Image (cartoon, rainbow, N blue to C red):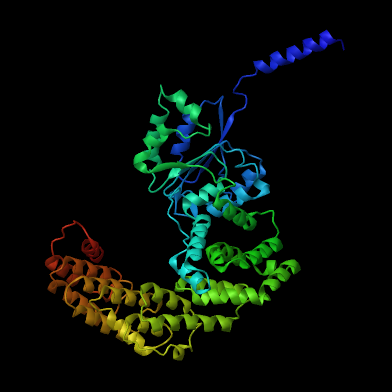
Amino acid sequence: MSVPIRFRLAAAALVALCAIPVHADKKTVCTITVNSPDEKQIFGRNLPTDEFQFVELVERGRPDWLASACRAGIRCDVLLISGHFDGGDEFYSDRPDVREYLPVDEMERASCSDSCSGLFSELKEVYLFGCNTLNADAQNVASAEIARSLVRSGYSTADAERLVRGLNERHSDSNRDRMRQIFAHVPVIYGFSSKAPLGRTAAPLLDRYFRPGANAESVASVGSGRVNPKLLGLFAPSSMTATTGVTDTEPQADNRRDVCRIMDDGSSTTRKVAFIHDVLHREMAEVRMFLGQIEKYVSTLGETDRNVPAVSGALAQIAADQATRDRYLAFVRDADEPAVRVRMLKLAQSLGWLSTDDLRVELVSLMRDRLMQRALGPADVDLFCSLNRNGELNGNLHLLSVREDNVGNAAVRACLGSEKGRVRVLQALTSTSNDDVEIAQIYLHHQPIADPSELRGITAEIARMKTGDAQVRALGALARYEISDRDSLDALTRLFPLTRSVAVQRAIAGVLLHADYRALEKPELSRALRQHRLKSPGGEDLIDVLIRRLES
């Protein structure tokens, strides 16, 4: 081909290329709509179709819709997520016809896995329309407890404090941190530091953002990777804020890499178990900060996984690592927070470091330590009673040989079978101490009253109490029982006209609403309620509900 001909063809090709519209490469706006479509509809109505194309990732009725989007090779320039956010675990809907939801774990898996490398790889902007999506409050804090433990293990105070600061930088796990790690390197992430507006409230604000006259500037901003102050200003009363995805030079990048070692669906189970073993070799304070991720992964290992030779071999290496086991258990036994200590002990059993009998001994030892401190509160009672939900610790009561004059101590011993402790806790139900009543209520949640005579005695004691908040709380504890005992019901109905407290009358109505209706004298009770009810300052209440049910 002669040079002139080649030149003319090249020139023609260049002219043709220049003639292609500048909007030929549309920006892809991916939407994940698990609640109202209001925000998506406003974006769709205002962004020109020759510049933007919309792809809804949620496929109704299909549980693996996010994985499906990954397999389809979709690449998003902009991501818009609309849904209620429960504070850390998932986006969800309050609409009964919508069953789809978006777990944060699945977002992490998509972000970490090569099988989904394209979906988030080209993102310029993310819009998170959900409460607390960018809340910066740390959910995983290296507390003073860890600093004290480090000092007791030989660190200087200064070194311990420095290590704690570093752990908090890497592992704070606030909602904001998790979103920044999921959307690593994304230039702009919009979200809310506290309460977000519902879709029907957000829609008019977005309409103002895209209103005629300002539309060109707003449209140009979408997908630009630059924060738009106008958008932040419109949503400022609703706590909208903006941040960027984590970069490779930040301390949190190390945490993201660790999380991805577990969440990457391209990594084998054997490699993940080996990685867990590597983490356990680290400073135990860091193992404590990574505890949630380790627990979550180990809990997914079923019998099928554990029976794979390579996996069982990797698990056996952990179980046989005596040095790491000893360091781990020494740290656990030194921990100040009972709930954390229990979690770490149960993980030790899952890793093969404690037998069932060993775990039982450790748990009873923990209880004994706390009982000796005589500082048990409602949270301790709830924790310790839950540990013996199925009677696993029965037979160990003799190991908790402490006095039961403290209601918390009595409740823990009662949960392990102490009759004397139970009597003491039931007496506390009519106490004037808020803490004692709360402990009694928590205990009864785990060990409810089944004996009618016991229930009758408690009801009589509550009826004899001095009117006040304590009596209202005690009646609230009775409301969970379907009382059918006539003597108990009579005691409550006699109390109703005698009390001078609307709150007490409402609490009595709450108990009677849950009672066995066959045991109630309906016409007589209805008349008594109407005749003796005190004027309610707040309008209709439980007393009205009870009267309607009695007369229906």
Q: Position of residue 492 (x, y in %)?
A: 21, 76
Q: Indicate the quadrant containing the C terminus: top left, top right, bottom left or bottom right.
A: bottom left
- In the displayed structure, would residue 174 be above or below residue 202? below
421 or 515: nearer the viewer? 421
> Which residue ends up furthest to the right in the rendered image?
1
- In the displayed structure, would residue 539 be above or below residue 44? below
- In the displayed structure, would residue 54 be above or below residue 128? above
- Residue 117 figure quarter: top right
- In the displayed structure, would residue 213 be above or below residue 263? above
Q: Position of residue 201 (x, y in %)?
A: 36, 39
> Which residue ends up furthest to the top in the rendered image?
4
534 or 380: nearer the viewer? 380
Q: Residue at x 35, y 85 (%)?
A: 422
Q: Position of residue 349 (x, y in %)?
A: 59, 75
Q: Residue at x 67, y 74 (%)?
A: 321
Residue 335 visible from this viewpoint = yes
245 or 512: nearer the viewer? 245
Q: Indicate the quadrant containing the N terminus: top left, top right, bottom left or bottom right.
A: top right
Q: Residue at x 61, y 53 (%)?
A: 257
- Residue 137 figure quarter: bottom left
- Residue 87 figure quarter: bottom left
Q: Report how many numbered discs are placed on residues in the image.
A: 0
Position of 539 compared to 115: left or right?
left
Q: Residue at x 45, y 73 (%)?
A: 336
Position of 532 compared to 432: left or right?
left
